[in-house]
Amino acid sequence: MNFAASTIAAESPEPLVIATLPTQHVAATQLDYAVEALLAEHQLPGLVLMIKHKQEVLHYSAYGQVNRDKPELIKKDALFRIFSMSKPITAVALLQLVDAGKLSAKDLPIFTAFKPIKL
């Protein structure tokens, strides 16, 4: 089951209402319930969620615990260690810039450091 399908399927006592106009605020209690259901469904210890629209913060909350071994509640300013995940995120961002024509592959040292391989 993919992540998007499973999050939409989370049951709630009331329909989830999210702002449809920039000035409306997220229905916090319904969103809180949906996030707690998501954490339980995917067995995640916790998360921090911020929803913004045009620089206006519509929702900002912390849910769950720091980790499963510590019963300490997570805080909004929690740091998340992504370790080596920064490398593929950076690579995708650079390749998207190349694809959009905003950056040339020749500008990236990694592409000039290696000789082309003929297959």
Image: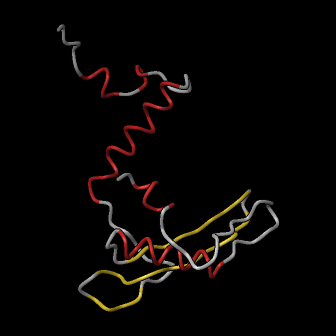
Residue in the foreground of this view, choosing between 35 and 49: 35
Q: Residue furthest top?
A: 118
Q: Position of residue 79 (x, y in %)?
A: 40, 73
Is 57 placed above or below 114 here?
A: below
The image shows a total of numbered marks equal to 0
Is 9 placed above or below 107 here?
A: below
Q: Position of residue 116 (x, y in %)?
A: 23, 12
Q: Position of residue 14 (x, y in %)?
A: 63, 77
Where residue 43 sits, quadrant-wise, is: bottom left
Name the residue at 46% across, 78% down. 36
- What kind of colouring is applied to the model shown? secondary structure
Residue in the foreground of this view, choosing between 36 and 88: 36
- Could you tell whether 70 is left or right of 58 in the image? left
Q: Position of residue 92 (x, y in %)?
A: 40, 38
- Could you tell whether 48 is left or right of 110 in the image? right
Name the residue at 34% across, 51% down. 86
Where residue 40 sits, quadrant-wise, is: bottom left
Question: The C terminus is located in which quarter?
Answer: top left
Name the residue at 66% across, 62% down. 52
Residue in the foreground of this view, choosing between 29 and 6: 6
- Could you tell whether 88 is left or right of 15 in the image? left
Residue in the foreground of this view, choosing between 76 and 43: 43
